[in-house]
Structure formats: C-alpha cells, structure tokens
Image: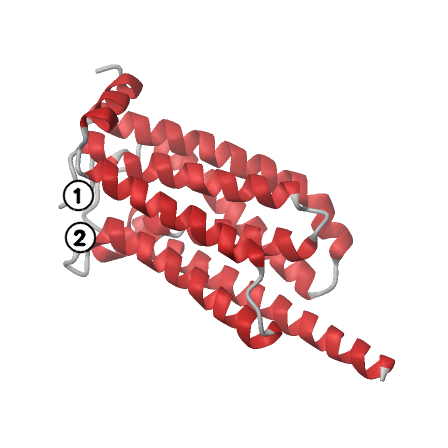
Amino acid sequence: MTTLDAQAGKSRFQSESRFFLIMSIVSVAILFVGFAPSLYLKPIIQAPVPPLSALSFAHGVVGTLWMVLFVTQAALISNNNHALHRQLGMMGALLFGLMAMLGYWTAIKAGELGHAPPEAPPPLAFMALPLIGMTGSLLLVAMALWNRSHSDWHKRLMLAAMFSVTGPGTGRIAVPLGVAAWGPHGGMFVTELLLVVAMAYDQMQSKRIHPAYWYAAAILVATHIAVTWAFASPAAWIAFAQFLTQQ
C-alpha cells in the first residue's frame, strides 16, 4: 500500500508540474501575441504602431527575460531539477524587481506625456491599470518568495503572479480585433479566468482548492476593483496621478 501511495504521489506531482509548465507557456504566449506588433515582430509585420521609447523597450526586454526564466523554472521542476531551480530563483526575483521598477517608471512617463491606448480612459486615469496592476503582481511575488520553503504555496503564488502580468498582452490583442474599449477590463478578466482554470485543476486533482489561490484571487479581484474605481477619474486618484507626473 505504501508503494502504491508513493507511486500515486509521484504521478500527481508529475501531472501537476506539467500543468504549471503548460499554464506558464499559455501566459507567455498571450504576452507574445499582444506585444508582437510593437516589440517582438515589429521589423517583420510592419504594424502601424508608434515606435517604442528607450524606456518602454528596456521594460520589454527585462520583462521578456523574466518570462523566459519563468518558463525555464517551471520546466526545471517538471524535470525534477530542483537544485538549479533554486539557484536561479534569486535571478528571477531580481529580474522581476527590475521589471516592476521600469513598469512603474514607464506608466508614470506615459501619464506625463498624455499617452493612453485607443478608446482607453484619459491618460491620468489609465495610469491606474499599470500602477495598481504591477503592485498586485509585486505583492504576489513577495508572498511567493516569503513562502519559498513551502513549495505548494510558492509555485501557486508565482503562477498567479505570471497570470497577473498577462493583462497588457490581452489588452493589446483587443485593439486589432476592433474591441479596444474592451481591452483594459478584458485583460483583467482573462487574468482572473486563468486563475479559475488553475483553481479548477486543483479541485479535480486534490478535491480541494489550495488556500494560496484564494489569496491570489483576493488580490486580483481587489486590483480589478481598484482600477475600475480609478478609471472613473475620482478626485483622489487624479490628484495622486498629478503628483506622480508633477502636473
């Protein structure tokens, strides 16, 4: 019976690891498609998009490095290479921190210059999406790092963090589809949908949803509510945005 239990546990771990790898790849694919016209395939497809600033390009490069490392980390766990996964962990944390810093800077600069996507809220209101969204992502990563010695918590919180950064990719996909106005909220809904898929997988595999996902859900929903509030251009948010952009 003990041998059967061990085999079942190993099989469940392998299945779970494959699921995490697949969901990581799906998340990266969303970002790749969304940013293909402006970054990844810009020299090839010649899309009518404005050129990226040096700051936006740097943010994109660092974000890409983090995404590649994230999938690599998921693949290492799937192949039982835990030692290298741990060695690369600090690099991932540093890359994410740098990506977040550049993301904040890029968002503030866009608000300062009056830039916002087509059919989006006014620039100062739209700043809420990257600023609040990145804060939610940072919180998830911080919680994951705090729980790095508890792999069940760590991997779920990191996967939720990956989901949380897919929003900009989804929002950009909406523009050529003619539903640009749907982009900001659509990006957040897709993020939440990805988390629901992960929660459903947990329920099917373990007959329960891990608490880490409920914490992640609370953060993602709170982020969505906060962004929706800011999109209405309340005086408090506009004053904060003006302070950040020195207007």
Is 206 positioned to the left or the right of 98 in the image?
right
Which of disc 1 and disc 2 is earlier in sequence? 1
Residue 163: x, y in percent?
45, 54
Q: Quadrant of residue 120?
A: top left
Count neighbours of disc 2 (C-alpha within 10 A) and say few if under 14, some if 14 to 19, many if 20 or more.
Answer: some
Q: Is residue 247 above or below residue 179?
A: above
Q: Is mark 1 on a helix, strand or loop?
A: loop
Q: Quadrant of residue 104?
A: top left
Q: Which residue matches tag 1?
A: 120
Residue 86: x, y in percent?
72, 47
Q: Is residue 224 above or below residue 71?
A: above
Quadrant containing the C terminus in the rendered view? top left
Residue 87: x, y in percent?
73, 44
Q: Which amino acid does label 2 sit on?
A: Ala
Tags 2 and 1 touching, CB below 8 Å: yes
Structural distance between the alpha carbons of marks 2 and 1: 8 Å
Task: Say how the picture is coloured.
Answer: secondary structure
Residue 30: x, y in percent?
38, 58
Closest to the observer, 122 or 1:
1
Q: Which residue matches tag 2?
A: 180
Q: What element carries label 2?
A: helix
Q: What residue type is labelled 1?
A: Ala
Quadrant containing the N terminus in the rendered view? bottom right
